[in-house]
Amino acid sequence: MNRYLFFFFFLLGTGVGCRAQESPYFVTYDHHLEEPGNLEVETFTTMGIPRSGQNFYAAPYLELEYGVTGRWTSELYLEGQGTAGDSAVFTGWRLENRFRPLKREHFMNPVLYLEYERTSEATRIQKEIIGGGPDINSPNSELQPVKNNELEAKLILSSTVHDWNIAGNFIAEKNLSQSEGFEFGYAFGFARPLASLASGKECRLCRENFIAGLEFYGGLGSTKGFGVHDTAHYIAPVVSWQVSEDGSLHFSPAFALTHEGSPVLLRFGYSYEIRGFGSKLAQFFGGKH
Amino acid sequence: MRATVLPAATALALLGVVFGQNPSYQQDPKWRAPAEAVAKPNPLAQKPEATAGGIKLFQRNCVECHGAGGIGLEKKHAADLQLPAVQQQSDGALFWKITNGNTDRGMPSFSRLPELQRWQLVLYLRTLKPANEPQSKASAK
C-alpha cells in the first residue's frame, strides 16, 4: 500500500509540462505577483539524494496560486512525502499571502509575505530552509504524528536591473505548537532570460523561452542560537522553459554547502496558468464577470 | 487553534475569489508617466522587423484583456489601445505604463518581461489603427 502511495506522490510531482517569463526560482520569491483573476496550478517535487545511512525521498507538492488583486496573491499548498524503504505520507497544507505595498516599480521592490502552515515533522518539500533544515534521519512513523502549526513571515526585496532579476528573502518562522522561539532563514537569487528580444515566430526551443539563474538559500538558526552553525545551506542553478503559452517546466539541482540536510536536492515541476479563472468562477455562480 | 485558523483561512481565500476582479474600468487621471519616462525614445524605433515579436508578445500577454487588435474588452474594462488618447502618448509613456501597470485598476505590471520585449510591445501598439483606417503590414499579419 505504502509503495502505491509513494508512486502516486511521485507521479503527482512529475506531471508533464508558466506564463511568459515566469520566475525560475524554487525557493526565492521576487516581486512579481500573479495577475489578477488568474490561477496558476503547479506541481513540484523535491527529491533528496541521500548520504550514507539515509534514505532517498521524494516530496511532491501541489500549489494553487491566485491573483486576488494586482497587489495581493494568495496560495494554497498541499504536500506529501515518500521515503524509500519507509512509507508515503500526506504531510499537510499551507496558506500564504503576498502583498505588494508599493504601486509602482522602484529600484527595490518590497513584498510582504505571511503564511500559516499545518504540517507534520515529516515535511520535506523544503520550500524554505529554516533553522537546521528538516529531520531526514528519523522514520516517518516517528515524524508524522508530530503536527506543527506555524506562522511564517518573509520580507521580499526584489529588483529588476536591465534583464536581470535580483531578489533576496529574509525569513522568520514561529512554531506555535512548540516553544522553539523564532527560527530564521534566507534566500537569494538572480536570473535572466536567455534572450532579450522576442522572435516573430512561434518556437519552443528559442532562447527567449528559457530563463536561467542561481539561488542560494539556508537556515540562520533561531532566537536560541542565531547564526549559520549547524544549519543547511544550498547553492542551486535554476532553469525554466516555457513549453506552451500557459505551461512551463522548471528544474534545479541544489548542492549542499554544509553537512546538514541532504547533499543534493533535485527539484523539478510543471506550472500551468488558467487565465481569467476568477471571471469564469464568478460566471459559474451567476455573476456578471 | 486549528478550529479558528482553518475557517479564517477558507474565508480569506473565498473573499479573494469573490472580490478579485476589478468591477469597472475608467481611465485613471493619476496614472501618468513622469517626464523623464515620457522623453525616453524607443531603442527599437529603427528596427521595424522587431514588431513581429511584439505581436507575439501582445498575443501572449495583452489579448486576454485588450482583445485582438487592442480594441479593449468591455467585460475586462480594458482600454481601447486604438484610441487617440492612447496613441498620442509618447513611446516612453507607453513603455512606462507597460512596465509599472496600474494595479488598482486591473492593469498588471509587465516588468518581468525583458526591457527590449516591452519596447517591442510599444512598437506593435503603434501599428494599431481603428478598423476604418488602413492597417500597417505588421498588424495585418
Image (tube, rainbow, N blue to C red):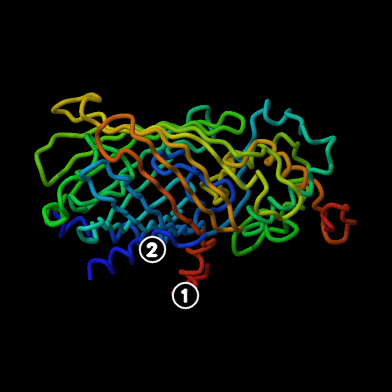
Q: How many marks?
A: 2
| Residue under label 1 | A284
Q: Is residue B99 visible?
A: yes
Q: Which mark is residue B78?
A: none
Considering the image in quadrants, where does the N terminus of chain A appear?
Answer: bottom left
Could you say which is closer to the camera, residue A109 or residue B86? A109
Q: Eyeballing the image, is B44 above or below A65?
A: above
In screen coordinates, is B87 left or right of A208? right
In screen coordinates, is B21 left or right of B8? right
Could you say which is closer to the camera, residue A69 or residue A165? A165
In screen coordinates, is A245 left or right of A60? right
Q: Position of residue A185 (x, y in %)?
A: 29, 33
| Residue under label 2 | A12
Amino acid carrying label 1: it is: Phe
For discs 1 and 2, the disc positioned in front in the rendered view: 2
Asked if disc 1 and disc 2 are in contact, CB closer than 8 Å, the reply is: no
The residue sitting at the left extreme is A179
Residue at 42 percent of width and 40 percent of height: A29
Q: Secondary structure at mark 2?
A: helix
